[in-house]
């Protein structure tokens, strides 16, 4: 019996619609030279090793079976169809280090994890339309103006926050309370903000579908004195929430 080595993920276009197929990859035998020589690569999901026979595999057996189960769910399948192009490797949006680089100009699910993405959630009984809006509101000392900024998303939210020169005294604000940028109290505020965002089901769905990839944000900043949310503060919180939501 031939040994199954992994799965190849293909997309076919049928009547202007895309459908997904997971085809098993088996070891292959040559009539003249015995078994084909083995090649080695990494599973595009978990990063585990796959030995295959001169044929590119995308997923190891374990990850392939897990994705097969997901593809049985029509809502998941339709979601993929809506968000993906023809390139099957875009499903995991990987670089060579098996990382998912979050950004508004990428594709699913990296795009959906950007703070610019629109998600409705409530934080301390204040309606927010994006994490970007909430973060930019922290720069504003006025409570009423903060509420209005929270309703913004994307570049509108970003540019609204640019006029506040919070970095001069390293102070941020939330509904009448002042926070020092390098304080534990501010870190707790960020924790609560992302926990509130995680209540949004669409956001949680996208986050869980980043699987066990390391999340990075290469276009962000690392210096706490220059940004209200560093790369590490952002990505570490997302990966913690993903684990709590039942992701890897």
Image: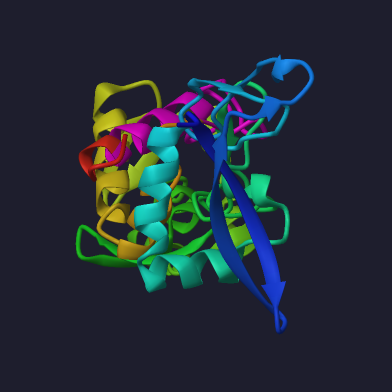
Q: How is the image coloured?
A: rainbow
Provide residue 18's location: percent of width, then percent of height.
64, 71
In the picture, measured across the screen, residue 16 lies left or right of residue 41, that is: right
Considering every residue shown, the one lying at the far front of the view is: 31
- Figure quadrant of the C terminus: top left
Provide residue 196's location: percent of width, then percent of height.
26, 53
The answer to which quarter of the image holds residue 233 is: top left
- Figure quadrant of the N terminus: top left
Residue at horizontal 38 percent and vertical 38 percent from the top? 238
Residue 216: say if magenta.
yes
> How many numbered discs sit on the rendered protein?
0
Provide residue 110's location: percent of width, then percent of height.
56, 47
Provide residue 83's location: percent of width, then percent of height.
59, 65
Question: Is residue 44 depicted above or below 174 in this figure?
Answer: above
Residue at horizontal 58 percent and vertical 53 percent from the top? 111
Residue at horizontal 61 percent and vertical 28 percent from the top? 221
In the picture, measured across the screen, residue 49 lies left or right of residue 14, that is: left
Task: From the viewer's side, name the closer residue of 9 and 106.
Answer: 9
In the picture, measured across the screen, residue 158 lies left or right of residue 213, that is: right
Residue at horizontal 73 percent and vertical 27 percent from the top? 54
Range drawn in magenta: 215-242
Residue 216 visible somewhere in the drawing: yes
Residue 116 visible somewhere in the drawing: no
The answer to which quarter of the image holds residue 239 is: top left
Considering every residue shown, the one lying at the far right of the view is: 32
Considering every residue shown, the one lying at the far bottom of the view is: 15
Task: From the viewer's side, name the closer residue of 158 and 77.
Answer: 77
Residue 187: say if magenta.
no
The answer to which quarter of the image holds residue 29 is: top right
């Amino acid at each position: 019996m031939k040994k199954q080595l992994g799965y190849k993920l293909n997309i076919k276009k049928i009547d202007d619609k895309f459908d997904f197929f997971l085809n098993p990859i088996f070891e292959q035998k040559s009539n003249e030279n015995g078994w084909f020589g083995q090649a080695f690569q990494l599973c595009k999901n978990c990063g585990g090793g796959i030995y295959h026979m001169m044929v590119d595999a995308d997923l190891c057996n374990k990850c392939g079976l897990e994705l097969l189960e997901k593809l049985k769910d029509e809502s998941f399948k339709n979601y993929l169809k809506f968000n993906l192009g023809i390139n099957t490797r875009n499903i995991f949006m990987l670089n060579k280090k098996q990382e998912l680089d979050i950004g508004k100009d990428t594709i699913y699910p990296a795009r959906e994890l950007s703070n610019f993405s629109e998600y409705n959630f409530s934080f301390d009984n204040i309606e927010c339309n994006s994490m970007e809006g909430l973060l930019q509101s922290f720069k504003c000392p006025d409570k009423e103006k903060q509420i209005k900024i929270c309703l913004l998303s994307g570049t509108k939210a970003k540019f609204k926050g640019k006029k506040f020169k919070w970095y001069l005294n390293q102070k941020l604000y939330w509904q009448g309370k002042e926070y020092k940028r390098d304080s534990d109290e501010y870190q707790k505020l960020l924790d609560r903000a992302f926990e509130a965002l995680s209540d949004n089901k669409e956001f949680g769905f996208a986050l869980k579908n980043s699987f066990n990839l390391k999340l990075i944000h290469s276009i962000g900043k690392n210096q706490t004195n220059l940004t209200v949310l560093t790369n590490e503060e952002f990505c570490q919180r997302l990966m913690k929430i993903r684990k709590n939501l039942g992701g890897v």
